[in-house]
Image (tube, helix red, strand yellow):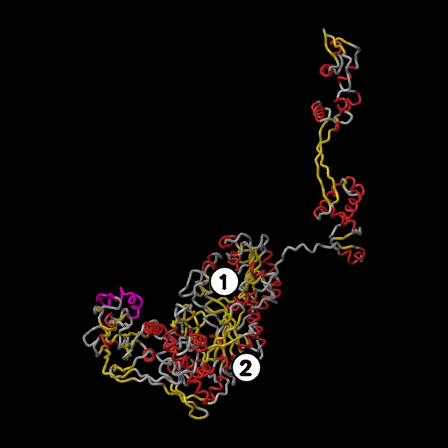
């Protein structure tokens, strides 16, 4: 238990005395009584002492009262001024005649007969006369009398007593060191070396500090950064690009048929304005209509360049991947992108119109489907998903396609993203002759699993308390 | 993706195995099990595999996958004398029709439900909501060939399905539930597509509704199929899937002459695939025999031609086989993904950050060092938050969403500071001080740029804090600026600074105007900063390595 020096000294004195007053201790410790009361209060918080407060009333004689103490009360002075009897008219000349005569009569010292005051012979000291010597010892009715006659005044005074508790005795008997203690270490004490003679006060470590909130990176961003680091470590180049895309790059270049429902206003955010088609768009048209120079049949029908010029908010980052491939058709290419994508969905706890998507592509001369599975296993493994399995999938721009699933305690196998090899219909228009492995992943979905979120909005419309309380080092991986 | 309901008893009978084996293997042939019920399992199949949208189709694939029956199913078609004429006046409206006759079928309740299911799925996936393809199935014995497909006037009338009175085509479009759902496809056309028999009995008003006359019941023995549409290939795909499903269900198929063309053609498509090219793509070392055997499990007709070649008969219902790689995928599925060993290749490459993202990381370092907490608001916003509450004029370069889904998201953000203020509003009950920042994309005149914004709120937040913070920020960014008095109405006059670099405004900071605070329902003063990063660090926005 931590005690200040003053508390210690008080406790030691209490040990000797049991119960005492602040005045008494104040004299011994050479401290004002008020300070002693304060030390006592601190000791009592620790259960070592008890401070009792009592209020007492004290009578003090007025000037008049003190005068009567030496000269006697007016009735006594009057009584002593005459013999066995005296005419009233004579007594009326005495200075205390008015007060004294009434009291003498009331007390039964005299009787009045035919204009004369006659002593009865009985004139003992009255209780009031007695009380003047020690007014505080007087009975209550006499005190009232003193106050009423203006012989004394009353003052209230608070008295403290301090007593030691059993716990206090135990602590004191266990031994207390009375070395002087220092709270704040000063620059002077440090440079002068005075600190060597100081006893620095110990703190109560059971008391929690007031919380402070450091500035920090958003928990979701930290997870995104972790994914970026994994992919950079694996030798991938990072892509970044416009969130506004032409339908050509978002759909047509990815062999999405022009009448595919996902392209409609219902599912995709369309924006005003038209985007120019890039050089080489005719090959994409041919691919759609007839499979171009490949073994593909294409979708048939007529491909409409106007539809491809529509402006949309990108629905996937694959629109960036294909543009990167179109400008980098020679192997090897290893690239990734984590970026926001848009779907025309009403907001609810698990659907948002915008969210992050991760996408990786690998193009090289001899890469194959098993390598794609290898990349997926490696990436998910580094993300902390040890068990990964694969089942068939479908995406318009990949063939073969695969849906990876990861095993999560309490949830079982959870589908996490999609992958495949870009169709030749996608790569051939840009002169790409090597296979392109590709996979994508909804980043916010991983965040939900990792952080145990039930509402995706928490990521984007965050409660500041949530960000403050999420530890930077997130031990609880799913 | 449409959900297909597979009743256990029918499925087990058609597959020849128990439900547990089937359910265990369903994901491996490419389906998502939606729910397992007491009497049926509901599954989703990929839109590419329309042949799996019926219990019959799933059973056919499952028997092969389990090795109970491999190789192609053969679908004999015998000629009938039934014919269709297609009128020229439909050329611009709905020119294509496919037809076939299915005889001697005994449709149990389960088969009828399955038939309705595949019809619905085809309407959705291939037919694009009946616009591209619509299907009618009729009781052939109620009508008399030859049939006629032609454009009829709106005044033509018949008794549509589920009604007991004659209605004109115009009435059907307005009053029949299906009319209300699908009349938009043919509205404003000069004629309506109609199919009638030799006596003028109406079979169907495609793509809207059949006639009550030819309603299919469990008593129906002989069926006439009509598939109409705007895309010939899609029409034929739907017809083939329907015919093969009904043959698997026990019927026999007879062909129909449509304007002199005999259909359906249920013969397989001949293809050859290259064994080395298949192995290269999959990373496998299968022999030609192995590939042929795997593909037989996937219900192809497949034989080794030589060591390097396998010749295929691709079933007519496999409309998804457009390219050689589509077959390779079936090799991988048939072999089982679990048997393909995952392996990393030796592609050498060094990792490389994108400079824009790298800059964002540095900004996060600076801002968190200044004690600010990162937030990640939406990029879609609205004119109220972005401009009106900020007391600012709308940005003429802002990009508006054409069909917003709600009033909350009508445009792509052009600034970040308003979104920070909105977040402070949401967090007004949280402990002060609150200091938050965000860096990210904004869009102006169709181009994506990056900005950075910071906001601090507490009883002492003021111009001095904004100035000191902005000054530290610019110092850490290594940029010197000249402060110029700002007239931005979002800030208190005389307490706002435009940061000028080389004579251009690159950012702003100051004490937010109390009117703005009222608009956002914020109770405490706010010091705010916003910086245009692309003006400080011009960078190529497009992808680059």
Dot 2 falls on which chain?
B
- For the C terminus of chain B, the image quarter is bottom right
Q: What x and y, as percent, mark residue B212?
A: 24, 70
Q: Nearer the viewer, residue B109 or B172?
A: B109
Q: Which residues are magenta?
A: B163-186
Name the residue that disc number 2 marks: B343
Are there few (<14), some (14-19), or many (20+) residues within 10 Å of tag 1? few
Q: Which residue is mark 1?
A: A455
* Circle count: 2
Q: Is residue A122 above or below residue B343?
A: above
Residue B504 seen in this snapshot: no
Residue at 77% of width from left, 9% of height from top? A85
Residue B387 seen from this side: yes
Pick the residue in front: A375 or B305.
B305
The picture places residue B187, in percent across and down from the top left corner, at 28, 69
Are dots 2 and 1 on a single chain?
no
Q: Main secondary structure of the magenta part?
A: helix
Front one among B94 and B136: B136
Q: Residue furthest top?
A: A114
Cβ–Cβ under 8 Å for marks 2 and 1 = no
Residue A72 x, y percent position in the rendering: 78, 20
Helix, strand or loop status at disc 1: loop
From mark 2 to mark 1, how far is it between C-alphas?
36 Å
Relative to A94, residue A318 above or below: below
Chain letter of disc 1 in the image: A
Who is closer to the viewer here, B406 or A204? A204
Label 2 element class: loop
In-image side of B247 versus A79 (left or right): left
């Amino acid at each position: 238990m931590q005690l200040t020096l003053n508390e210690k000294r008080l406790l030691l004195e209490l040990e000797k005395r049991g119960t005492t007053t602040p005045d008494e201790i104040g004299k011994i410790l050479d401290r004002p009584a008020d300070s002693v009361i304060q030390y006592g209060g601190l000791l009592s918080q620790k259960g070592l002492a008890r401070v009792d407060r009592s209020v007492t009333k004290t009578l003090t004689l007025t000037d008049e009262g003190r005068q009567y103490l030496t000269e006697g009360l007016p009735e006594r002075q009057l009584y002593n001024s005459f013999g066995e009897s005296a005419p009233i008219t004579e007594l009326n000349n005495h200075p205390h005649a008015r007060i004294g005569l009434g009291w003498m009569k009331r007390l039964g010292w005299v009787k009045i007969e035919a204009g004369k005051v006659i002593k009865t012979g009985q004139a003992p000291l009255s209780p009031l006369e007695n009380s003047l010597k020690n007014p505080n010892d007087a009975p209550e009715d006499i005190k009232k009398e003193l106050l009423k006659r203006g012989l004394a005044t009353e003052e209230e005074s608070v008295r403290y007593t301090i007593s030691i508790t059993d716990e206090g005795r135990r602590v004191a008997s266990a031994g207390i060191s009375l070395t002087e203690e220092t709270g704040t270490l000063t620059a002077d004490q440090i440079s002068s070396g005075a600190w060597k003679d100081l006893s620095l006060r110990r703190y109560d470590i059971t008391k929690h500090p007031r919380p402070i909130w450091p500035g920090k990176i958003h928990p979701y961003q930290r997870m995104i950064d972790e994914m970026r680091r994994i992919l950079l470590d694996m030798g991938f180049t990072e892509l970044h690009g416009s969130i506004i895309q032409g339908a050509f790059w978002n759909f047509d270049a990815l062999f999405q048929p022009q009448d595919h429902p996902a392209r409609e206003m219902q599912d995709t955010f369309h924006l005003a304005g038209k985007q120019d088609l890039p050089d080489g768009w005719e090959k994409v048209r041919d691919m759609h209509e007839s499979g171009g120079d490949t073994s593909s049949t294409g979708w048939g029908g007529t491909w409409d360049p106007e539809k491809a010029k529509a402006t949309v908010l990108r629905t996937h980052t694959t629109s960036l991947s294909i543009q990167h491939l179109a400008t980098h058709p020679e192997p090897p290419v290893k690239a990734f992108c984590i970026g926001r994508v848009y779907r025309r969905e009403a907001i609810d706890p698990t659907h948002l119109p915008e969210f992050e998507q991760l996408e990786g592509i690998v193009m090289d001369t001899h890469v194959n489907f098993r390598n794609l599975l290898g990349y997926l296993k490696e990436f998910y493994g580094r993300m902390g998903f040890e068990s990964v399995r694969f089942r068939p999938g479908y995406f318009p721009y990949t063939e073969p396609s695969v849906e990876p699933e990861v095993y999560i305690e309490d949830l079982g196998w959870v589908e996490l993203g999609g992958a495949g090899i870009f169709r030749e219909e996608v790569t051939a228009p840009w002169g790409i002759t090597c296979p392109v492995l590709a996979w994508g992943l909804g980043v916010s979905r991983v965040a939900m699993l990792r952080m145990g979120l039930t509402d995706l909005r928490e990521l984007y419309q965050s409660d500041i308390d949530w960000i403050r309380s999420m530890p930077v080092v997130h031990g609880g991986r799913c | 993706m449409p959900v297909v309901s597979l009743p256990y008893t029918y499925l087990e009978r058609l597959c020849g195995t128990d439900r547990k084996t089937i359910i265990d293997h369903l994901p491996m042939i490419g389906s998502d099990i939606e729910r397992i019920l007491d009497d049926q399992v509901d599954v989703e199949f990929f839109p590419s595999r329309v042949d799996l949208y019926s219990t019959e189709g799933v059973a056919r694939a499952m028997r092969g996958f389990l090795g109970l029956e491999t190789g192609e199913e053969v679908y004999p078609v015998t000629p009938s004398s039934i014919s269709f004429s297609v009128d020229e006046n439909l050329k611009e409206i709905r020119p294509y029709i496919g037809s076939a006759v299915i005889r001697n079928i005994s449709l149990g309740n389960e088969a009828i439900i399955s038939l309705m299911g595949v019809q619905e799925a085809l309407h959705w996936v291939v037919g694009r909501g009946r616009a591209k393809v619509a299907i009618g199935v009729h009781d052939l014995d109620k009508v008399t060939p030859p049939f006629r497909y032609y454009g009829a006037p709106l005044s033509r009338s018949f008794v549509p399905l589920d009604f007991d009175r004659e209605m004109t085509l115009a009435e059907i479009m307005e009053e029949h539930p299906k009319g209300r759902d699908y009349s938009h496809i043919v509205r404003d056309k000069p004629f309506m597509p109609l199919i009638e028999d030799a006596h003028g009995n109406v079979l169907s008003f495609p793509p809207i509704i059949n006639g009550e006359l030819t309603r299919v019941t469990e008593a129906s023995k002989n069926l006439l199929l009509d598939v109409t549409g705007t895309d010939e290939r899609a029409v034929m795909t739907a017809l083939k899937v329907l015919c093969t499903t009904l043959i698997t269900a026990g019927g026999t198929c007879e062909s129909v002459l449509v304007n002199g063309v005999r259909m359906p053609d249920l013969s397989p498509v001949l293809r050859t695939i290259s064994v080395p090219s298949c192995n290269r793509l999959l990373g496998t070392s299968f022999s030609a025999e192995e590939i042929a055997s795997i593909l037989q499990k996937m219900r192809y007709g497949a034989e080794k031609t030589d060591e390097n070649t396998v010749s295929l008969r691709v079933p007519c219902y496999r409309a998804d086989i457009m390219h050689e790689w589509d077959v390779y995928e079936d090799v991988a599925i048939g072999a089982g993904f679990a048997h393909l060993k995952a392996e990393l290749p030796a592609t050498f490459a060094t990792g490389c950050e994108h400079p824009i993202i790298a800059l964002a990381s540095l900004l996060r370092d600076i801002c968190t060092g200044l004690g600010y907490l990162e937030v990640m608001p939406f990029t879609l916003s609205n004119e109220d938050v972005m401009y009106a509450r900020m007391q600012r004029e709308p940005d003429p370069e802002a990009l508006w969403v054409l069909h917003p889904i709600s009033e909350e998201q009508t445009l792509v953000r052009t600034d970040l500071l308003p979104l920070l203020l909105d977040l402070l509003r949401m967090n007004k009950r949280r402990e002060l001080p609150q200091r938050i920042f965000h860096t990210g994309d904004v869009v102006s005149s169709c181009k994506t740029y990056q900005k950075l914004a910071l906001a601090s709120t507490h009883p002492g937040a003021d111009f001095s804090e904004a100035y000191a913070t902005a000054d530290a920020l610019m110092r850490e960014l290594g940029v010197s600026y000249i402060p110029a008095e700002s007239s931005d109405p979002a800030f208190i006059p005389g307490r706002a600074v435009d940061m000028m670099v080389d004579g251009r405004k690159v950012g702003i900071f100051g004490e937010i105007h109390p009117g703005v605070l009222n608009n956002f329902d914020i109770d405490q003063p706010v010091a705010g900063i916003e910086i245009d990063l692309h003006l400080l660090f011009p960078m190529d926005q497009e992808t680059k390595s």
